Amino acid sequence: MIRTLSGVSVVALLAVSASSASAQDLMFPKGEGDFSWAALESFAASHDYTGEKLMVTGATTGDDAERYRTLYAYFTDATGAEVEYSGSESFEQDIVIASQAGGLPDVALFPQPGLAKDLASKGALVAVDDAMTDFMTTNYAAGDSWKQLATFPGSDGADHVFGLFFGTDVKSLVWYVPEQFEEAGYEIPETQEDLFALSEQIVADGGTPWCIGLGSGAATGWPATDWVEDMMLRTASLEDYDRWVSNDLKFNDPIVVNAIEQYGKYALTEGFVDGGPSAAASTDFRDSPDGMFDFPPKCYMHKQASFIPIFFPEGVEAGTDVEFFYFPPFASEEALGRPVLGSGGLASVTNDRDVTKGFMEFLGSPIAHEIMMAQGQFLSPHKDANLDIYTSDVQRALGEILTTATSFRFDGSDLMPGEIGTNAFWTGMVDYTTGKSAQQVADEVQTRWDAIQ
């Protein structure tokens, strides 16, 4: 039997170390600033949960939890209910045990949807109704991408929506130093065709366009899988991308081989990468952007996710010394729109209570996103959240990429079986970068996949 959460917006990525959010001073005084205060007032007028307590569990711990405690305080102030959060680095193991022992919380916060999918199939999660599905499609950018990402088979074998994403990261980015571009007369490319032409121009001018580093200890190779995933979204349909992740589209299908080769156009073309392909395969991803900041620069561009500034050299400030542009689509594939590759946290309901419904309704409102945005390090695809709330131009520009996306998909390797996504795919991309053909690598990965089915 499928449990359904009725008439509520299921949203959250919550976190606060094992403690509760109770009445306290609000970080952002109500009525001040460009927040959606009217929505909060309307919500408070129709929800009174005085004396109630809401239990939430997730993987987030430490200092990051304080930002979510700030958010919970607004729910407590509006409704009188207390929110108690328990965070654990062993969340994935803990939530499975809780589902088996009958000790589930009211809301579970999944860092990625794979585990949620497993628990949904066992009847541990509450499916949302059509109203929630409509909310997600209407209020989030990227069409129905987010609804699709939260749709899994339930215990009845039928597909249902089991949550909503709150807080995302963007991977479809290219970082560059504006001063270097300006001095050389380079413009931001709007298409893949323009990006490749720019790469050729930089080589013709005596420079090196790209810094690439696949090194990451036992995880070496993953940055190249991000390239391939982005290329899949720019050369194949969303349906084919999803079929590839589930292996309904075989890894050695020509569509996938083509995406690998599109990465190779940048990584393997002579003169395109600082140190050449062998250096790309061995350079640690954390060190690989450094060449952009040398004088003269060892490279002009670096493709990496929104987290990479924490690894830039000391003193380099994102938004001032270095900026980014959206990894563009192919002009020849206009029908595929502006896809974005990234990640996000999924909140799912595990206990259908009135206070839980109200809590999720609150978190579905734009002000919940704005409170998080105002504290930094939080991105949202919510179209009604005020972009002016972001604390920096960098965050605002990332938010604009999310809200102007026509589609969004998760890192495919994270959704594949571990034997493939965090093993064969990673090592295969290193092999491709150092000499094997795309077809050979794809065949070998598919052989590994066949062996585990």
Image (cartoon, grey):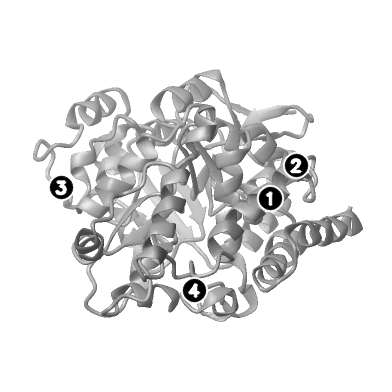
- Check if mark 2's residue and mark 3's residue have beta carbons within 8 Å: no
SS class, disc 4: loop
- For the residue carrying disc 2, how many other residues have a C-alpha within 10 Å: few (<14), some (14-19), or many (20+)? some
As measured in the structure, the alpha-carbon distance from the residue carrying label 2 to the one carrying label 4 is 38 Å
SS class, disc 2: loop
As measured in the structure, the alpha-carbon distance from the residue carrying label 4 to the one carrying label 3 is 38 Å
SS class, disc 1: helix
> Residue 264: x, y in percent?
61, 60
Label 1 vs 2, first from the N-terminus: 1
Q: Which residue is mark 2?
A: 122
User: Which amino acid lies under the numbered mark 1 shown in the image of this protein?
Assistant: Ser
Label 4 vs 3, first from the N-terminus: 3
Q: Which residue is mark 4?
A: 285
Q: Is residue 238 left or right of residue 329?
A: right
SS class, disc 3: loop
Nearer to me, 119 or 193 = 193
Point out the frontmost of discs 1 and 2: 2
User: Which amino acid lies under the numbered mark 2 shown in the image of this protein?
Assistant: Lys
Is residue 81 visible from the viewing direction of this image? no
Q: Is residue 387 left or right of residue 383?
A: left
User: Which amino acid lies under the numbered mark 4 shown in the image of this protein?
Assistant: Phe
Q: Which residue is mark 3?
A: 28
Q: Which residue is mark 1?
A: 99
Is residue 263 visible from the viewing direction of this image? yes
Point out the frontmost of discs 4 and 3: 4
